[in-house]
Amino acid sequence: MQITLIGTGNLGTNLYEALRRAGHDVAQLPGRSFATSDVKGELVIIAVKDDALPDVANRLKDCDMLVVHTAGSIPMEVIPCRRRGVFYPMQTFSKNQLVDFTNIPLFLETEQAGDIKVLESLASTLSHNIYHLDGEGRRRLHLAAVFVCNFANHCYALGAEVLKEINIPFDVMLPLIDETASKVHNLSPREAQTGPAVRMDRNVISRQEAMLDGRTKDIYHLMSESIHDLKI
Amino acid sequence: MQITLIGTGNLGTNLYEALRRAGHDVAQLPGRSFATSDVKGELVIIAVKDDALPDVANRLKDCDMLVVHTAGSIPMEVIPCRRRGVFYPMQTFSKNQLVDFTNIPLFLETEQAGDIKVLESLASTLSHNIYHLDGEGRRRLHLAAVFVCNFANHCYALGAEVLKEINIPFDVMLPLIDETASKVHNLSPREAQTGPAVRMDRNVISRQEAMLDGRTKDIYHLMSESIHDLKI
């Protein structure tokens, strides 16, 4: 497929590589400064930061090809074109770590019923996890993704801050991090939970809280209470 | 080595299997109701819940073999024996998912300098990640483990709650969960962070907060602020 990909950030970089490897003819343009005369092909994919998306979408208002964005939390309607849609790959992308798209769930939506075939055809060249989801569903899906990815990663970051105080390298946590991720392939997260909060071991909880201060202490407290609330 | 293992919970079950597979002669006793006359061998390992540990340790006060516990947050001194120590495997254990000990970091401490060799000798039959750490260090290490394991898993659980509302199976999150864990093998958690909070995308943040209520909303708010604080 002949595709114009707008965006050169974390997602743009990863998507460009994946599309090229799948054999597509991709022209990649920078989100900030592309010329609309360079926008060509059957499909335009906008992969820019959410706050740059309305401006980029508006510059494409005269496009008659299918124009899609890639954002979890933004409605399709941000694109002012008749043929519009969403191609949301739910994954965490970094420029310096290219990911394999094969297992990435791709969530598709289009305004015109006929256009969903175009997105499905493209998606099937990248991944075998393809779903249809409307804007309201995608908005909630993205919220769930923030919890399991961004917030879980921040828990790693807060753990790393604690480790700095005792000069233990973060690598020592990797078997625990990997097993925690691996367990939820076989158990629900509620079934998989262990540790002082789910046991409501008040001695350990209060001694651990006492080692923290400020916002991290508040996070420890809320997370421990929330774990106990969700206990099976 | 001839070992008495006291405890039949998540850790006890996993440790028993790992010790047996490594060729040790292990007698496993229940923490609640063992007879001290059944405690035999060169080493006693107590693997019971933190709040049951003082009682079990006190029942072993007349033991002249090396007695160790397995708890991250409890000082060695809870054991009233001359030959005492700690053998802390930092991992999340569930009875229904046995883990491979090979990569699990084992943190060792003993009262008597000579006894550390006994624990090292045992540890080396299970894992190649062996560390010496005193009680104060272990207490902080365990706090870090609570963040990267229990709290990260709770982020999975909160994501699962959001997904229930849109009837999407939790399995769809597994590639994202796995990639989030995989990234911190190559990047620090701060470098690996993505999403609306690290971008301080206030539009998405406020719309996501509005989908939540109660304690989960408070967690979302604090985590987002904390991510931005730690931003590189």
Image: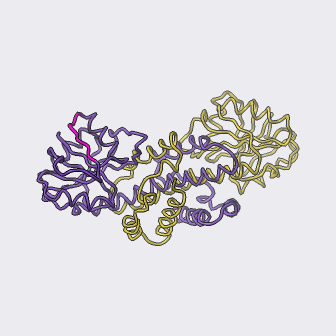
Chain colours: A yellow, B purple
| Residue B101 at x, y percent in the picture | 33, 40
Q: Nearer the viewer, residue A7 or B187?
A: B187
| Residue A10 at x, y percent in the picture | 61, 47
Residue at x-position 56% and y-position 66%: B222
Bounds of the magenta span? B23-29
- In the picture, measured across the screen, residue A12 lies left or right of residue B30, that is right
Residue at x-position 43% and y-position 52%: A194
- In the picture, measured across the screen, residue A209 lies left or right of residue A30, that is left
| Residue A95 at x, y percent in the picture | 57, 45
- In the picture, measured across the screen, residue A20 lies left or right of residue A197, that is right
Q: Nearer the viewer, residue B10 or B87?
A: B10
Looking at the image, can residue A41 be seen? no
Looking at the image, can residue A88 be seen? yes
* Image quarter in which the N terminus of chain B is found: top left
Quadrant hosting residue B195: bottom right
Location of residue B212 with respect to A29 vertically, above or below: below
Residue at x-position 76% and y-position 31%: A2
Residue B188 inside the magenta-drawn segment: no
Residue at x-position 50% and y-position 48%: A191
Residue B27 inside the magenta-drawn segment: yes
| Residue A61 at x, y percent in the picture | 86, 48
- In the picture, measured across the screen, residue A189 lies left or right of residue B39, that is right
